[in-house]
Image (spheres, rainbow, N blue to C red):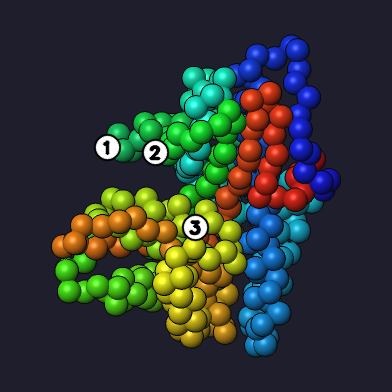
Amino acid sequence: MAHVKNEITKSKLKTPKEQITDILSDLLKVTAIALPDDVFESLKKMQACEDSELSKELYSCIFDNLDKAEKLKRPLCQDTGVLQFFIKAGVRFPYLALLGDAIKDATQNATSSVPLRHNVVESFDERNTGNNIGTLAPWCEWEIIDGDGLEIDVYLAGGGCTLPGRSKVLMPLEGYEGVVKFVFDTIVEWGVNACPPLVVGVGIGTCATTASILSKKAILRKIGSSNPNPKAADMERRMKIGLDNIGIGPLGLKGKQSVQCVNIEYAAHHPATLGVGVTVGCWATRRGSINIKNDLSYEITSHKNKIN
């Protein structure tokens, strides 16, 4: 594996759309095969904290899996998920109109070349599309920002880590204690299905919809980061301690730690409602981040190394 390249030389033989497609195909390949730096380092630290023979052996299996994925240049998990893109688009990015089609083309390219498992099934028809493209798939969340570049996060939403996802609106008197209870109930009941140790995203807002979206954005944050609001940061810290004390351990087979982190994102809420959402990432939380400049040079910021 070589160090991430900061730039790509634009080919005069390719259109801007084709260049963007190639860039995003590269991002999808890296994300499917290698863990982001912070997740990898988190697992290393958690491995060092475990002292039971079973926990040590399970972490050894995890890192053996990662090593084989790198050497064989194949996805580190057979469930490569459904692709979700979170896009911060600069208003002056010159190729914004091409981005939607480039995302679909990159998805189709990666499906055949990485390869990604065919996971997109059309609702009601229950027909697998065979190329990971379908109605509103890949899913794209758009945010317009000042600037002339793109910031894109991609998340591979697998079945196991998606299963514990929950959101609801709490009764007015439940308050933040109700938020904590909802998170703990969700992880205790469903966390073992998501291949621990988990990345836990919590969203807080007015309704179930905003809380759910914010919880997904929370797992895009780096492990070890804290919410800038001191009260939210304190809740993150306390919930991590509490969830670790449950002792779910690696792959749900007991251990000293259950979660890699608890990240909270929030929005202002209605005085009579408090929405809460939970999204969970498995030990192999596969997310990738990239910055693309207006000249189509780019940097994959989530991975120090890339697959050649």
Q: Nearer the viewer, residue 99 or 294?
A: 294
Residue at x 41%, y 31% (from the top left corner): 134
Circle 2 sits in a helix, a strand or a loop, which is it?
Answer: strand
- The answer to whether residue 305 of the structure is visible from this angle is yes
Q: Are marks 1 and 3 in contact (CB under 8 Å)?
A: no
Residue at the spot 56% in from the left edge and 20% down from the top edge: 95
Marks 2/1: CA–CA distance: 9 Å
Q: Residues within 10 Å of mark 2 (few under 14, many from 20)?
A: some
Amino acid type for the residue under numbered disc 3: Ile
Q: x%, y% of residue 78?
A: 58, 51
Horizontal and vertical percent for residue 54? 64, 83
- Please name the residue that numbered disc 1 is placed on: 124
Q: What's the mark number on residue 121?
A: 2
Give the foreground label among 3 and 2.
3
Residue at 75% across, 56% down: 68
Q: Nearer the viewer, residue 247 or 89?
A: 89
Q: Is residue 42 left or right of residue 141?
A: right
Q: Amino acid at mark 1?
A: Phe
Task: Tell me the distance, in whole angstroms, between the alpha carbons under discs 1 and 3.
Answer: 29 Å
> Given the image, on which type of amino acid does mark 2 rest?
Val
Distance between mark 3 and mark 2 Cα atoms: 24 Å
The image quarter containing residue 15 is top right
In percent of width and height, residue 259 lies at: 52, 72
User: Residue lying furthest bottom in this view?
Assistant: 52
Image-quadrant location for residue 56: bottom right
Q: Horizontal placement of 45 versus 148: left or right?
A: right
| Residue labelled with disc 3 | 219
3 and 2 marks in contact (CB < 8 Å): no
- Label located before the other in sequence (3 or 2): 2
Q: Residues within 10 Å of mark 1 (few under 14, many from 20)?
A: few
Q: Reply above or below: 113 against 65.
A: above
Q: Is residue 115 visible?
A: no
